Amino acid sequence: MSLPELPPLPALTRAEGELIDRYLEAADLLGRINPSRGTDTYGSLRAAQALVDRAVRLRDALAVMHARGETELHAATLGRALRVLDGERRTRRVTLPPENPG
């Protein structure tokens, strides 16, 4: 059984690719920290500690883009890249889960 073929990533600058990677790393960690989805404080603490480093890397990726004159975020292209890299699933844990009725 073969896996479904993923759509190709859109053309990105190296800095845009770095931005996407760092953003998804931070989103993964925020999902692990989310108190409405977590199960233990230790796991959340470890994710919060790692988030500090990932936030610095995310900031640095944006600073490189800005310094290179990449002053615009091309939302449609970056959004396609996030979707190809499973960004919808990876960012879903950052939001509140549906409320359980009664």
Image (cartoon, grey):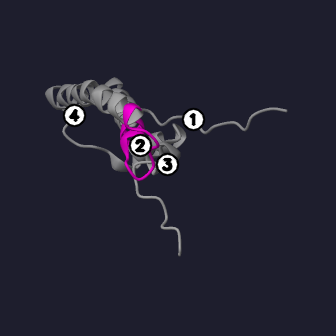
Task: Answer few, some or many: residues within 10 Å of disc 2's Cα (few below 14, many 20 plus, some between 14 and 19).
Answer: many
Q: Earlier in the sequence, mark 2 or mark 4?
A: 2
Asked if labels 3 and 1 touch by Cβ distance under 8 angstroms, the answer is no
**47 left or right, relative to 64:** right
The residue positioned 48% from the left and 67% from the top of the image is 99
Q: Earlier in the sequence, mark 2 or mark 3?
A: 2
- State the image coordinates of residue 70 (x, y, percent, origin top left): 22, 34
The residue positioned 18% from the left and 39% from the top of the image is 71
Disc 2 residue type (three-letter): Gly
Q: Which residue is mark 1?
A: 8
* Label 2: which secondary element: helix
Counting the numbered discs, the total is 4
Spatial distance from mark 2 to mark 4, Cα to Cα? Answer: 29 Å
Q: Nearer the viewer, residue 73 or 38?
A: 38
The stretch of residues the image draws in magenta is 27-42
**What residue occupies the far left of the structure in this picture?**
67
Residue 31, numbered label: 2
Q: Is residue 25 visible?
A: no
